[in-house]
Image (spheres, grey):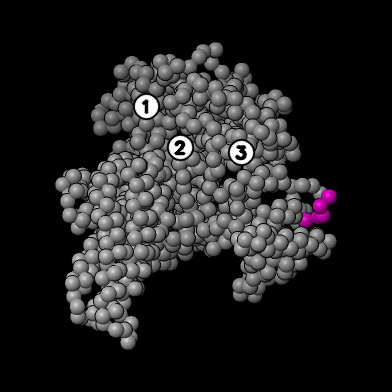
Amino acid sequence: MDPISLASSIITFIDFATKLFAAGHSLYRSTDGLSAQNADLTHSLDRLDALYADLSKPPALISAAEQDRSGTGSSAGEVELCRLAAECAGTATQLRAALEKIAVKPGSVRSAVVGTVRSVFDGEVKRCEGRMERINADFQRYMSAVLLDRQSSMSKFLVKLADEHRHFGLEGQRQVNNLRDDLVDLMEKSRDDVGGRLQEVQDVCESMKQLLLSGQEMAAQHRLLKSLHFAGMRERRNNIFDTHEDTYEWIFDSSHADLDLGFAEWLRTGSGVYWITGNPGAGKSTMMKHIYQHERSITLLEEWARPNRLITGSFFFWSSGSKMGKSLEGLLRSMTFEILQQCPELVSCISENHEQDFHWTEHSSHYLGTNWSKSKLVLVLRAFALQTDAKRRFCIFIDGMDEFEGGDLEVSKVLSEIVSWGTFKLCLSSRPHVTFKAVFGNDSRLVLELHQHSRLDIRKYAADLLNIDTCNTKARLQPGIEALDGVRGPKTMFSFTRDEARLLLDLITSMADGVFLWVYLVINKIQESIYNCDTLEEIRAILDNVPQGLDAYLNTMLDSIPQSYWSDSSKIFLICMHDGFGEMPLLAFQSIAPLPNESLTLDNLEAWKERAAKRLTARSAGFLSTTRSYSTDGSEIEICVQFAHRTMSDFLCEQKSLDKIISRVDPAFDICYTICSSLTNRLPEIFLTGGAVGDPTHKIWHAIDSARKRTGDIPVWIFDEANAKLASAAAQFPDLVTDLRVEILSFAWNSDFIYLNHAWRRDSEYVNALLLDVGFPQRPLEIALRDDLTHWPTKSTVDWLLEHGADPNKSTGVDRGTVWTLFLESMVENNGNRIRKHHPNLFCGLSRGSSYPLLLMESMIHANADLHCTVPYVLNGREHAYSLTEFVDAVLPREDAIRVKRVITEENHRRAQVAIMQRAQWSGWS
């Protein structure tokens, strides 16, 4: 019970006792009517029992939601409230005993009853009445301080709540503001009422309780959104070029380029899927961003949704981005996140068990994974769609399905299921893969082949970038500003006739064949030529020598890299091509193309970024681009490096291109070592540039895991270096590195415990002190034992966690499972036959090593794991459950099963002996 609820219980008891004493005085003076009073006494006894139960509940001096955000503890006034509640409970017990004495029993002599009543009231009741007067006076004195303390902590809580509301872009900001206004009104009211009548104080307490409940509901929404959010969720969409002026507007027409268009009609009245397809480089992503953000799309969709509320969202797959940015889980999490942003009330669709499963805390959010799964996310979205009182319609724009890391059929099935619910419709884009054609390309009215409609847009784009005005008799050709990084050339290089201009544009448009990327690259080359004062004939000669196909042109770009840059450019390409790293911070490449020794400061930071970006651009020949990452509040985080277009990444990954790149680099070059070394050496600078440590360290962990898979070795020295660099950053930037210990601890959890095991062997006392000082994150044992780890923790790690309070019987919030039962489940796959081992090489007897699950089972058994648990499995579509011994027999080899069952028997015997000794001590026998 929180302090405000406790205060309400005390007020209720004081009020009840006051009325009881008044009734008692009337009874004391009465010589008849005792039988009539008997029923009231029975009711009073029942009421006292209920009040005693409320007053005896263990008080939670400060709610978890408040403590998590305000960091405040319990005040002296709250401690006194607890004392008063205990006194009230004791008084309630004494009053009950007194009332039982004066209750009229059948056959009682009246004179004896009257004597008993007066004796009881002169003794026990009068003493209770005096005690209650003192309790009431103390309560009035302490309650004022308690309310002020509560209001202060709640004010901080609501300020942070408002900040989080803005951070997540949630609708309903007015609701948060109303809570803050209500708190101000409540503070004014409490100043007037505290010290007055109990009813007014009770009203203030009740209002504060309701205010806190409303705030906690919002805090629960924020925790859920934090669990769904992932780094770079909107990065891809933000980095896509906006459409060129007056291009792509035809998408809302009924026809274009002599072809019927059904997009606007689909927005207004359609259902299911509208599919935008096109050749590589045709501008599909730019089109998707354009229509998603266009006011015309919203207007037409609102017509479709009316009278229901329209909810829109988007996701842009990116094969060169983070793992989440190219996964189905990332898509589903993004959809759920954006829907909850607009409809926070839909949090109620997610069960309480799920919300507990995705619990979040300040210290653990950046290094503990969530338990969202694809199947669970689909269930959540389905719940949104199928609400019985649903008054919403959803339209989601999904770009780059062909950049999904799984199979085309997998993503097609999930998206087809989503539209089958009826309240969702999807606008999709992808390259024309066979599977997508088969699933989404059956109705020509719902398919747009973008490259067939791009001719006029490409022509306008080229004319504008070259500043060609085809309406004039004399056209003037001059360099556009866009491709020259703001460096202006001569205003007019030369002029030529309108026919000459048209011929030049016709040539560019024809050669482009609907591929905007080709035009972008060629125009850049022409602009450079203009800046060099080349003539029109020389520009035409450039076009004559430009390969018409995109792959052929990219090959000329690769060959154009100066030989002096070959080694650097190849290393840079290989790092960017390495699967799983996604965008890399600009700092990660400084060991390859370093600037002259120069210490970074806030004063020279921008100039340093510009020079470093230019050096990278010179070595990448246009294949790479730099983008600035921003936080949700608009502040810059860091400069990242990525492929300028997915097609460029695909081209370099082709075997012919890859062979050329590898031939230009030293055979001793190690991608993982270079990434680890670059990032760890630059951690202090990453802090200086405003970058968060989380993303670089994630890339370090990924590089280490890649190295382990390739060589079998674990380069744990990288962790030591990163630890030292973090310490250096903490000393240099104390305001940026707020809790170094938590950052160091994150290495242990995010590296599948590799570093924790390494550090344990080297200095166990240091690890003990570090983890105990920082405190455990959420469910450390569950994390250590989860079945998706690539590296099992050592037995010493698990034993250490168990010795220091990790509970194998702790609920995980997942289907009422515990850490222990989920660990057992992870050892099997339910396939309808005899249960098959999840890790068959791990169950080969005790001689194989100490890190195998068999010994981990024994450790948890000795740490009081539930020996009467059941382990569920599915057979012939029906759920069954093993007892622990049945599970052991079914899963383990015979020799190991005998061993574990012997351990279970011995542990049962030990626990029974402990229970006997404890009962003997409690009974006073020993």
Which residue in the protein does label 1 denote? 482
The circle on residue 498 is: none
Q: Residue at x 59, y 28 (%)?
A: 723
Of residue 74 and residue 808, the one placed in the foreground of this image is: 74
Foreground residue among 540 and 915: 915
Residue 823: x and y in percent read 64, 57
**Quarter of the rendering occupied by the N terminus:** bottom left
Disc 2 element: helix
Left or right side of 344 for 543:
right
> What residue is shown at x 47% (from left), y 23% (from top)?
733
Instruction: Give the Cα distance between marks 3 and 2.
Output: 44 Å
Residue type indicated by callout 2: Leu
Q: Residues within 10 Å of mark 1 (few under 14, many from 20)?
A: few
Q: Which residue is mark 3?
A: 748
Within the image, what quadrant is residue 604 found in?
top left
Amino acid type at circle 3 is Ala
Identify which residue is drawn at 44% across, 44% down.
Answer: 233
Instruction: Give the extent of the magenta segment.
Output: 843-847
Query: Quadrant of residue 666 in the image?
Result: top right
The image shows residue 791 at horizontal and vertical percentages of 68, 45
